[in-house]
């Protein structure tokens, strides 16, 4: 809060500000930047935690769990190219982020149904849908931002949008990481103690839990 306040104070007085505060009086810019911010939270949280889930639930290696994100990238690149071509031909772009938001929401709802028994091909389908939604939003939002400002500020507006997407990514991974770690430790501690292990053993095991460590634990745990 102190840093944001200082930033606003300095930028409001700067002759050539890094981020002109006048941008935030532009409703279209603010909305598109907010979408980019939320996009960063969702996209990078998925990139951070889906491979972890795949490693622990299916025993996939770190390399394989990363490669299993390829369907997401295929969907993202495919719909980015498709939407770009359609926008070039029609000049219309409003429908794409709306459809993309719906697809992304559906995919995130589908992610909540994952269990240790969910087949890998189905997880890849979920990731493909998620990537397709992201692809319809990501580049179109940048285009909206660029069209919402005058030509002299296109570069600054584009970089500002990208910056807030990266802020969303950092906050998303941090916030969901804290929730994930807290809930995981709490739940696994009860599992360990319920199976007869001491609280100290549970704390030590959950602090270093990875697929290799998981395979060495007793079957009951």
Image (tube, rainbow, N blue to C red):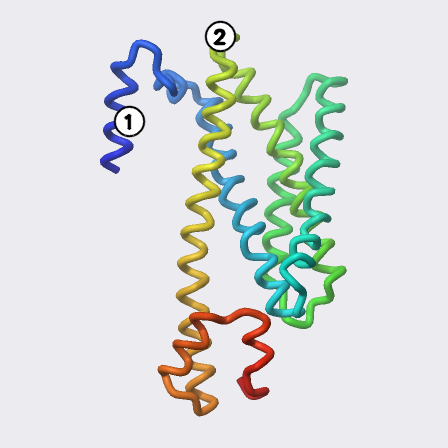
Label 1 crowding class (10 Å Cα cut-off): few <14, some 14-19, many 20+?
few
In the rendered view, would you say 146 is above or below 59? above
Going 30% across and 19% down the picture, which residue do you hit?
Answer: 11
Residue occupied by mark 1? 7
Residue occupied by mark 2? 152
In the rendered view, would you say 116 is above or below 83? below
Instruction: Write down the quadrant of residue 56 in the picture.
Output: bottom right
Going 73% across and 42% down the picture, which residue do you hit?
Answer: 74
In the rendered view, would you say 132 is above or below 198? above
The one nearer the camera, 151 or 211, is 211
Going 51% across and 40% down the picture, which residue do you hit?
Answer: 40
Whichever of callouts 1 and 2 sits on the residue coming sooner in the sequence is: 1
Badge count: 2
Going 53% across and 21% down the picture, which residue do you hit?
Answer: 145
Q: Residue 78 carries which label?
A: none
Circle 2 SS class: helix
């Amino acid at each position: 809060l102190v840093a944001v306040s200082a930033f606003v104070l300095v930028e409001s007085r700067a002759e050539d500000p890094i981020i002109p505060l006048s941008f935030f009086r532009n409703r279209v810019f603010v909305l598109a930047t907010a979408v980019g911010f939320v996009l960063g939270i969702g996209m990078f949280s998925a990139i951070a935690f889906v491979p972890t889930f795949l490693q622990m639930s299916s025993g996939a290696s770190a390399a394989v769990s990363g490669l299993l994100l390829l369907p997401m990238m295929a969907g993202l690149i495919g719909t980015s190219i498709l939407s770009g071509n359609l926008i070039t031909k029609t000049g219309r772009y409003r429908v794409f982020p709306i459809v993309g938001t719906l697809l992304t929401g559906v995919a995130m709802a589908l992610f909540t149904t994952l269990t240790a028994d969910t087949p890998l091909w189905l997880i890849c389908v979920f990731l493909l849908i998620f990537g397709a939604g992201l692809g319809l939003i990501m580049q179109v939002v940048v285009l909206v931002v660029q069209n919402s400002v005058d030509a002299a500020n296109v570069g600054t507006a584009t970089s500002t949008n990208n910056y807030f997407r990266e802020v969303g990514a950092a906050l998303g991974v941090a916030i969901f990481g804290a929730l994930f770690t807290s809930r995981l430790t709490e739940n696994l501690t009860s599992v360990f103690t319920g199976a007869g292990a001491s609280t100290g053993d549970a704390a030590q095991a959950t602090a270093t839990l990875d697929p290799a460590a998981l395979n060495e634990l007793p079957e009951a745990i």
